Image (cartoon, rainbow, N blue to C red):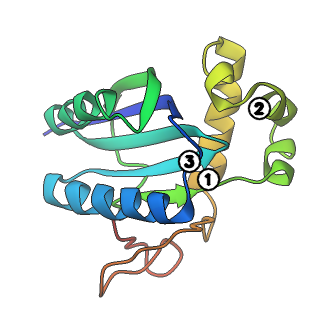
Amino acid sequence: MPLHELVYLSLAEHPMSDGELCELLTNARAYNDAHGITGVLIYRDREFMQLIEGEQADVMALYAHIEHDRRHTQVHCMWEGPIQARSCQGWLMGFAAPQDTELRALPGGQQLLDEGLFAAGRSSAGQHILRHLMADVLHRPEPALAMPPVRPGRAWPGEGMAAAA
């Protein structure tokens, strides 16, 4: 079956605690494991950016569920389309919470600090910067996975590339 990916942005209803993020990641990883989905979630200051990938029907069903999740609002699809290969092979749901210094190091990263992820995602220039952020997270040898609820027998990317979700 052809692979599909979707990248969306959203705004959390409230600042998420570490416990809430761990619960969200644990549930997402279990769902993704059961449905052949891989991806990565980026969270910063109430803003989410998430890449999900898998078979088109599975990705679109998950996105429909995400759009109605009451933990966030203003869900905005930034990109959606077919892909040749997964970017997150082995990551049921990677996670990163980039710091200011990491964002400043990106081309145009100061704009993300000034506007936020969500506002940046509304312009083509901002989307370009967000693609740099996603590429940076995807190409880290050991992504900043600050909340790692891992199922037994699974490792994080950089440790055999079999992250749990």
Farthest top residue in view:
123
User: Which mark is nearer the camera, 3 or 1?
Assistant: 3
SS assignment at label 3:
strand
Q: Position of residue 103 (x, y in %)?
A: 79, 44
Q: Counting residues from the N terminus, which is met first, the one under dot 1 or under dot 2?
A: 2
Q: Position of residue 109 (x, y in %)?
A: 81, 36
Q: Is residue 65 left or right of residue 111?
A: left
Residue holding disc 3: 42
Nearest the eye: 4 or 144: 144
Compared to residue 123, the image places residue 3 above or below, namely below
Q: Quadrant of residue 153?
A: bottom left
User: Which mark is nearer the camera, 1 or 2?
Assistant: 2
Disc 3 crowd, CA 10 A, few/some/many (<14, 14-19, 20+): many
Please say if the residues under marks 3 and 1 sit with CB atoms less than 8 Å apart: yes
For residue 137, which numbered disc appears in the image?
1
Q: Measure how far apart labels 2 and 3 are at the Cα level.
A: 13 Å
**Residue type for callout 2:** Leu
Farthest bottom residue in view:
153
Residue holding disc 2: 112
Residue at image point 61% right, 26% down:
118
Residue at image point 14% right, 32% down:
57
Nearest the eye: 162 or 28: 28
Disc 2 crowd, CA 10 A, few/some/many (<14, 14-19, 20+): many
